[in-house]
Amino acid sequence: MDNAILITGFNGEIGRQTLLSLSKKEIPIIALDINESDIKYNNVVYIKDSILNQSVITSIFNDYNIIEVYHFAALLSQSANNNPELAHEVNEEGSQLIINSAMSHGIKNESFIKIFFPSSIAVYGPRKLKNAKELDIIKPQTIYGCNKLAIEQFGTQRHEESIELGFGIDFRCLRFPGIISPYTIPSGGTTDFAPQMLHAAYNNERYTCKVDSATTLPFLGIKNAVEAILQIMVIPNIDSKLRAFNVQETNLNPKEIIAELQKEFPKFIVDYDIDSKFQSIADTWPENLNCDEATKKWNFVNNQNKNIIFEEYLIPEIKKHYGKH
Ligand code: AKB
């Protein structure tokens, strides 16, 4: 049986760019998503189905020797708030099914299956923290944050059981802040205002922001988000009981984002129409993250410079992206 990588939720913002990077490796990839793919890579087997379909997951693990799993399929924070039952099913039960299937496969093959799980700053709360460390107060105030924390803990527990057994899973997790991508306009998240503003500014559109101008949150450009995933997965062994690491590039509020964008797009205008569903969540998420653990474990670089992400990456890249269409 050939070695292969499984990626779920590959049509989402992070999944899409991770699949692009993984497709450059010479190993078959099994890509599972509820939606059809609009891009086809040669070494990828596409499966259109749900992560809740136990028989599909079982047959993937029976048909391929899965050695790594990248599990992105999930509802984001606002979508989860609007559909709490579906969020519980997809974000928790679906993730547990993937983790348990990988664990059984690892035990059967007497090996360790590496699993990447994208957690979120949503695990923090109830107060807005500054320089939040991994073990700081963790009392998520949203369904989505509770789902993420439950899977961090479930994966960590299965990881510890695997160490005891000598086979199973090697669980690795990053706590992502808001992701800014010059390639896609996200929806369903609380931090979406940053990428939405970038695309609106480029497209000469007026933007209505749902959180107030001083709401500061941590962010990471998609390129460095994918880089961090590849980095944490490539380390042979993370010698730590801590399995979930903070990563961020800078922290920003709407006022600062507008100022950066107006340097390049001076006609960009933003109105505010504060929505309590967004504001109340953003107010419980940290202002910035302490990334010392990620720096110690695999030299993660947290550059903290607000200009660099716009001037050196997002603006040149969004111009290239739309220039293509
Ligand atoms: C969201 O806002 O839902 C996500 C996140 C920070 O987890 N982008």
Image: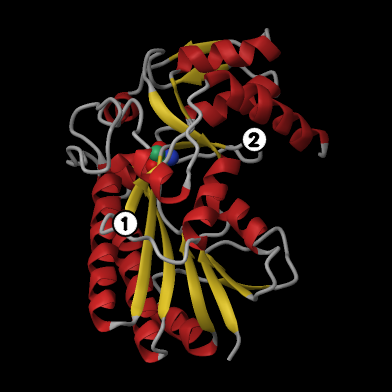
Beta carbon of the mark 1 residue lies under 8 A of ligand 1: no
| Colour approach in the figure | secondary structure
Q: Secondary structure at mark 1?
A: loop
Marking on residue 222: none
Q: Residue at the spot x=27%, y=53% of the render? A: 147
- Check the image and name the residue furthest to the top: 266
Residue 47 position in % (x across, y down): 58, 73
Q: Is residue 269 above or below residue 11?
A: above
Tell me the quarter of the image containing the N terminus: bottom right
Residue sitting nearer the eye, 218 or 134: 134
Q: Quadrant of ligand 1?
A: top left
Residue 308 position in % (x across, y down): 60, 23
Asked whether, in this view, residue 61 is left or right of residue 78, the answer is right
Q: Which residue is mark 1?
A: 243
Q: Secondary structure at mark 2?
A: loop
Q: Is residue 141 above or below residue 313?
A: below
Marking on residue 182: 2
Res 44 visible: yes
Q: Is residue 17 above or below residue 210?
A: below
Tell me the quarter of the image containing the C terminus: top right
Quadrant location of residue 115?
bottom left
Mark 2: which amino acid?
Pro
Asked whether, in this view, residue 195 is left or right of residue 23, the answer is left
Residue 216 position in % (x across, y down): 38, 21
Mark 1: which amino acid?
Arg
Classify mark 1: residues with Cα within 10 Å, few (<14), some (14-19) or many (20+).
many
Q: Residue at the spot x=28%, y=33% of the render? A: 132
Quadrant location of residue 230?
bottom right
Which of discs 1 and 2 lies nearer the camera? The answer is: 1
Choose the circle earlier in sequence order: 1 or 2: 2
Classify mark 2: residues with Cα within 10 Å, few (<14), some (14-19) or many (20+).
many
Asked whether, in this view, residue 267 is left or right of residue 14, the answer is right
